[in-house]
């Protein structure tokens, strides 16, 4: 999925640990072949080539599950989260490489192909229909979390319950390590690259994901743009931010971190407060200063000073 993965686990012996980890990594590779927008032969890209108006296309259960959850979040966020965003994401990737804003005509052409309302799912037939020509899908804001959830399920099927799946910083956590009440997760109060870790979360049987632009951004004509694209404008976000979301599973944490980055603090926290078991921390540069926003229950997951 274009990022490094790591598994930390506790097992009764090394052969059990190795076998479980190898099976989990193999399952992630299989899901990559289904969900990747980089692999031209992935099921996702084949769907984009085969489907179109009047062409409902059967898809695998994993792909359908991810698209179904994506559509639900798109409805909740009024399109702030939208997996049909690929045409403008590809255009924006090129703009970042060339350090040049996309031509207005090309941006308008790409935006015309974007809109979650043009993605039609049939749960009864497990089919997907793209209601406009030349639509493309991008699951970059949700697939990692889904795959990490599945990887943890694979470990559990092999008897491994104490485990952490690390998908390049998106974490899915099983039971606590031995002699501990949770996995100790470090975060920073600063949005700067390589910032000092000064806050700690204590989590188990949950997930945490972070979305931000500290490492991936571009300055064009003196203006800083994120790699995170706003589906409504087709351009990278301009409000420097980092969003950390705690949720019951990786798919929820991953997708909410992406959605809240676009929604902003007020709408993002309002959305989160409707979802049990979730919390978030939002850091934003405002008027030259770092400002922090937290959902009401975020602090309950923080490591207390007298804990190990």
Image (tube, rainbow, N blue to C red):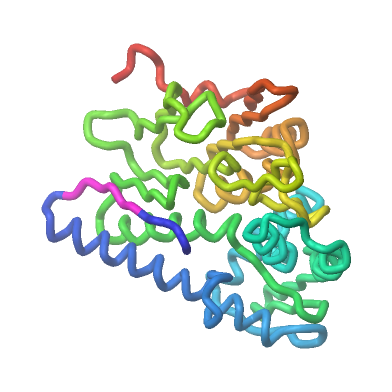
Range of residues picked out in magenta: 6-11
Q: Residue at x 72, y 45 (%)?
A: 237
User: What percent of the width, then of the height, locates residue 291?
Assistant: 66, 22
Q: Is residue 26 left or right of residue 95?
A: left
Q: Is residue 38 left or right of residue 21?
A: right
- In this view, 124 is above or below 150: below
Image spot of residue 120 (x, y percent): 76, 73
The stretch drawn in magenta includes residue 8? yes
Viewer-proximal residue among 182 and 209 = 209
Residue that appears at 61% across and 44% down: 257
The picture quadrant where one finds residue 295 is top right
Magenta stretch: residue 130 in it? no
Q: Nearer the viewer, residue 291 or 259?
A: 291
Q: Is residue 166 above or below residue 61?
A: above
Look at the magenta stretch and give its main secondary structure: strand
Residue in the foreground of this view, choosing between 255 and 134: 134
Q: Is residue 196 left or right of residue 209?
A: left
Residue 75 is at least partly visible in this image: no
Q: Position of residue 156 (x, y in %)?
A: 32, 55
Q: Quadrant of residue 134?
A: bottom right
How many numbered circles does the render carry? 0
Extreme top residue here? Answer: 306
**Residue at figure coordinates x 72%, y 25% from the top left:** 286
């Amino acid at each position: 999925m274009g990022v490094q993965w790591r598994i930390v686990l506790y097992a009764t012996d090394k052969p059990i640990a190795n076998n479980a980890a190898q099976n989990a990594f193999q399952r992630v590779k299989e899901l990559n072949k289904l969900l990747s927008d980089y692999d031209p032969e992935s099921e996702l890209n084949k769907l984009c080539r085969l489907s179109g108006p009047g062409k409902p296309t059967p898809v695998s259960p994993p792909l359908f599950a991810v698209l179904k959850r994506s559509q639900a979040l798109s409805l909740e966020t009024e399109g702030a989260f939208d997996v049909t965003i690929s045409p403008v994401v590809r255009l924006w990737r090129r703009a970042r490489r060339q350090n040049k804003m996309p031509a207005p005509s090309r941006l308008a052409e790409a935006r015309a192909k974007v809109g979650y309302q043009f993605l039609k799912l049939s749960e009864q037939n497990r089919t997907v229909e793209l209601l406009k020509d030349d639509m493309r899908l991008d699951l970059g804001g949700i697939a990692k979390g889904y795959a990490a959830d599945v990887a943890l399920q694979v470990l559990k099927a092999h008897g491994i319950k104490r485990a952490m799946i690390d998908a390049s910083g998106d974490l899915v956590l099983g039971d606590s390590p031995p002699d501990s009440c949770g996995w100790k997760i470090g975060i920073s109060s600063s949005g700067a690259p390589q910032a000092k870790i000064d806050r700690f979360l204590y989590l188990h049987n949950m997930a945490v994901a972070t979305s931000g632009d500290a490492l991936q951004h571009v300055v064009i004509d003196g203006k800083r743009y994120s790699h995170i694209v706003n589906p409504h404008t087709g351009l990278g976000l301009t409000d420097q931010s980092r969003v950390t979301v705690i949720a019951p599973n990786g798919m929820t944490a991953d997708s909410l971190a992406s959605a809240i980055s676009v929604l902003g603090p007020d709408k993002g926290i309002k959305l989160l407060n409707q979802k049990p078991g979730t919390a978030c921390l939002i850091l934003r540069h405002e008027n030259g200063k770092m400002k922090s926003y937290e959902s009401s229950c975020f602090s309950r997951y923080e490591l207390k000073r007298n804990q190990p």
